[in-house]
Image: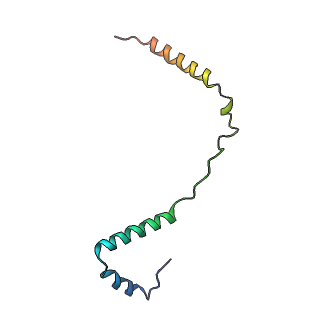
C-alpha cells in the first residue's frame, strides 16, 4: 500500500513530534508486519515419503551389517 503523496508532508510533520521510544516501537511493529506479509507459504510435507520404499527396509539387518563393517574396519587397523 502506497501513501498518497498529499499526505506525505503531514505524516513527516507528525513523525517529528513522536517521542523516540514510541517511534522505535512503531518501527519495530511495522517491520514485523512487513515480515509477516513476506513469509513464504508453508508446504504440507505429510505423506511425502509414502510409497517410497522405506517401509521395505529391514533396519535390523542394515544395522547389523553396518556394525560388522565398522568392527572389521577397526580390527584391520593396527594400534601403536
Looking at the image, which is closer to me, 17 or 74? 17
Residue drawn where x is 49% and y is 64% of the image: 36
Task: Give the image quarter of residue 9.
Answer: bottom left
In the rendered view, how is the structure colored?
rainbow
Left or right placement of residue 67 versus residue 44 in this view: left
Q: Is residue 13 left or right of residue 48?
A: left
Residue visible at 50% across and 77% down in the picture: 1
Give the quadrant of residue 64.
top right
- The percent coordinates of residue 7 (x first, y second) are 43, 87
45 vs 30: above or below: above
Query: Extreme bottom residue here?
Result: 6
Q: Is residue 16 above or below residue 75?
A: below
- Would residue 30 be found to the left or right of residue 69 on screen? left
* Picture coordinates of residue 41, whole percent (x, y): 57, 58
Q: Quadrant of the C terminus?
A: top left
Among all residues in the image, which is located at the extreme right? 51
Question: Foreground residue, 48 or 18?
Answer: 18
Q: How many marks?
A: 0
Q: Is residue 59 above or below residue 16?
A: above
Give residue 79's quadrant in the image. Answer: top left
Q: Residue at x 46, y 11 (%)?
A: 75
Q: Whole-percent x and y of residue 39?
A: 51, 60
Q: What residue is drawn where x is 70% and y is 38%?
A: 51
Amino acid at each position: 500500500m502506497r501513501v498518497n503523496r498529499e499526505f506525505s508532508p503531514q505524516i513527516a510533520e507528525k513523525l517529528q513530534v513522536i517521542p523516540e521510544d514510541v517511534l522505535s516501537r512503531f518501527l519495530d511493529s511495522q517491520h514485523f508486519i512487513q515480515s509477516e506479509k513476506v513469509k513464504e507459504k508453508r508446504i504440507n510435507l505429510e505423506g511425502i515419503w509414502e510409497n517410497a520404499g522405506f517401509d521395505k527396509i529391514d533396519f535390523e539387518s542394515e544395522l547389523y551389517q553396518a556394525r560388522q563393517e565398522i568392527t572389521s574396519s577397526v580390527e584391520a587397523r593396527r594400534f601403536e
